[in-house]
Amino acid sequence: MQNGISIYPGLDNTLSENLALIETAAALGLPRLFTSLHIPETDPGALKRELGVLLKSARAQHMEIISDVSPATLSLLGLKEFNLSAFRMLGITTLRLDDGFSSEDIARLSHNTQHIRLQLNASTMTGRLLQKLVDAKTDFTKIDALHNFYPRTGTGLSEETLARKTSMLHKAGIRVGAFLPSLAGRRRSPLGDGLPTLEDHRTLPTSLAARHLVALGIDSVFLADALPTDEELRCLASLHDDQVVLEADLLTRDPAQKSLLSHTFTARIDEARDAIRAQESRRLIGGAIPPENTAARPRGAVTIDNEGYGRYMGELEILKTDLPADPRINVAARIRESDLFLVDYISPGRRFSFLFPE
């Protein structure tokens, strides 16, 4: 996944803190950097002093630099006109076009010769605006989209809105990103309430919120706050593209079952009523599986059929409903309560895997 961080020159962090953040993110393989050049609370003097230094550092790390711009950006940077060459000289490789740009403006800019990509505001996109962009002959090969973040508590998107807007853009062949807040790091001023895209994520642990965005089909995840922790950055760097990752508790000591649980699976197309069935699991078993922990199977139990089930030995399932104990079925793991809601995103054909915290 092409995930990233956010920096805000002239706001909250010192120059050295921002430089260290860029270096840490790059070392972890996070290739994208988002910045905004029209935040009202920004110190304009500090912005002008620090921006070039920070972008030079990001360029040296071969990061994609995305800048949120609006007509107000011109006065902040001391520019007389909206000139793509000026942004290119700063090292900005993608412009996220916020307020003040018509569909004709976006279409014209998409044909630029400065090799600058454009980013649409996914949260405010409508079917009508998307059709206008098509009619204006926009070059969509140079465009992706990124949802807003929402500083004020209670203003973040609902899951239904994010899913609907994201699906609309995906149908047009446009990849979509979204933001996460930092829960344990420094939250961006002036409010300090976190910068999530989804309101539900404002107080969720970063790992769970990030995996939820991936489950919802988001292609690129950004930590939006000023100074996330190293652990939050590592979490972002370890995200798996297009699969539902479930945090679970391991209940087996058997090496064969442990090995099986380390794989990534595909949910069978012929969806069962009571369980999500792994398509590949029986082919991955290398030896006999003895009976072990043949207990009752609540929703969220991860079960593996033992040798008592004959040719079904190795069948791996995630229970969607409570079922009684069966001596032929081992309960090898259990999805954590916090992650149970993610089970509902494993649709037929969707990949899934397990994360076992130490």
Image (cartoon, helix red, strand yellow):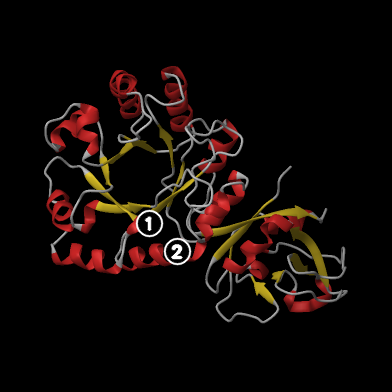
Sequence-earlier tag: 2 or 1: 1
Q: Name the disc covering residue 161, or none.
A: 2
Classify mark 2: helix, strand or loop: helix
What amino acid is at disc 1? Ser
> Which quadrant of the figure has residue 68?
top left
Image quarter of the C terminus: top right
What amino acid is at disc 2? Thr
Residue in the picture at 60% in, 35% down: 231
Residue topped by disc 1? 123
**In the depicted structure, whether residue 18 falls above or below residue 300:** above
Q: Label 2, label 1: how many angstroms apart (C-alpha)?
A: 8 Å
Q: Name the disc covering residue 202, or none.
A: none
Residue 7, percent from left and from top: 41, 31
> Which quadrant of the figure has residue 193?
top right
Report crowding for label 2: few under 14, some 14 to 19, many 20 or more residues within 10 A (C-alpha): few
Residue in the picture at 77% in, 53% down: 250
Q: Mark 2 and mark 1 in contact? Answer it, CB < 8 Å.
A: yes
